Image (tube, rainbow, N blue to C red):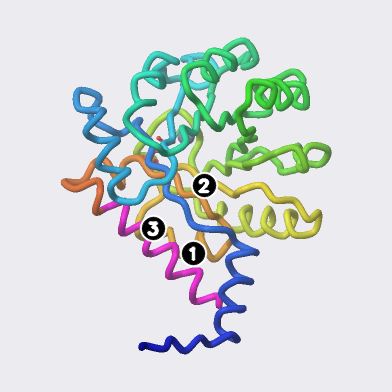
Amino acid sequence: MAFVVVNFQELSTHARVLRDYGLIELAPSILSADFARLGEQVRAASEGGASVIHVDIMDGHFVPNLTIGPLVCEAIRPLTQAPIDVHLMVKPVDRIIPDFAKAGANIISFHPEASEHIDRTIGLIKDQGCKAGLVFNPATPLNYLDYVLDKLDLVLIMSVNPGFGGQKFIPNTYEKIRQLYQMRARYNASFRIEVDGGVDAGNTAELAQAGANTFVAGTSIFHTADPAAATRQLKKLATQALSQKA
Ligand code: DX5
Ligand code: ZN
């Protein structure tokens, strides 16, 4: 009979880090995927350990680019068990929310600048049975959280200005995530901290140590020969960075 020796000291330190930082999740953004092979690409990312699929919805008005609608969300729904994380860059935002909920979205996030009544929009998302997220552009202050942070499941920090994949990561994101992490602890809130834009193997570890636990990555996953391996590598880097905290 084999015995396993458990080091309770080590176990409790890991449990504390896990409690404080949350489990690392990779959320590949299909914006950079090959749309002619979308199903295959979503499956590859899932195989690499993606536990969320990030879907960017742009309206050509709130942001300059125009992307996809609920139909594509509906098309990928049967291909993965992973929750679909819909990032709405649409203004006004309320009208389109039920359409994405019906199309299979599990998490719906919006920008405060796109809603006249932020609290009402959060309620609308929850009434549709989805988790709600609020998104902060690089120059948007975190004060928008002041009266709603207990209602949010997710806070998404943009590390590029929204609108396009493949942009350069803005370094003051680290500090913003650190502030958000402290704010969450101060108010005993439980939202996940997601980072989106220019995320790659060069910044993932520092982002995890700053407090991010959900990593959106488009180019660094889908513009590679092996999206599954790229997903696996980013997840490993973030997880290792957290274990150094233990
Ligand atoms: C940008 C989008 C991002 C984008 C990320 O407005 O919100 O989700 O797809 O792509 P990369 O990882 O290429 O910056
Ligand atoms: Zn996004």
**Magenta region includes residue 68:** no
Callout 3: helix, strand or loop? Answer: helix
Q: Nearer the viewer, mark 2 or mark 3?
A: 3
Q: Which mark is residue 103?
A: none
User: For disc 3, does the CB lie below 8 Å from ligand 1?
Assistant: no
> Residue 165 versus residue 187: which sits nearer the camera?
187
Residue wearing tag 3: 235
**Disc on the earlier residue, 2 or 3:** 2
Residue wearing tag 1: 206
Q: Quadrant of the N terminus?
A: bottom left
How much space separates mark 1 and mark 3, taking CA atoms? 13 Å
Q: What's the amino acid at mark 2?
A: Val
Residue at 70% in and 51% down: 190
Residue at 78% in and 27% down: 119
Residue 152, given in percent of the width and then of the height, sits at 70, 39
Q: Quadrant of the C terminus?
A: bottom right
Residue at 46% in and 69% down: 241
> Residue 55 versus residue 8: which sits nearer the camera?
8
Above-or-below relation of 185 to 231: below
Please, which residue is most extreme toward the right here? 147
Residue wearing tag 2: 195
> Residue 46 versus residue 225: which sits nearer the camera?
46
Residue 115 appears left or right of 15: right
Q: What's the amino acid at mark 3?
A: Lys
**Magenta region includes residue 240:** yes
Q: Which residues are magenta?
A: 230-246
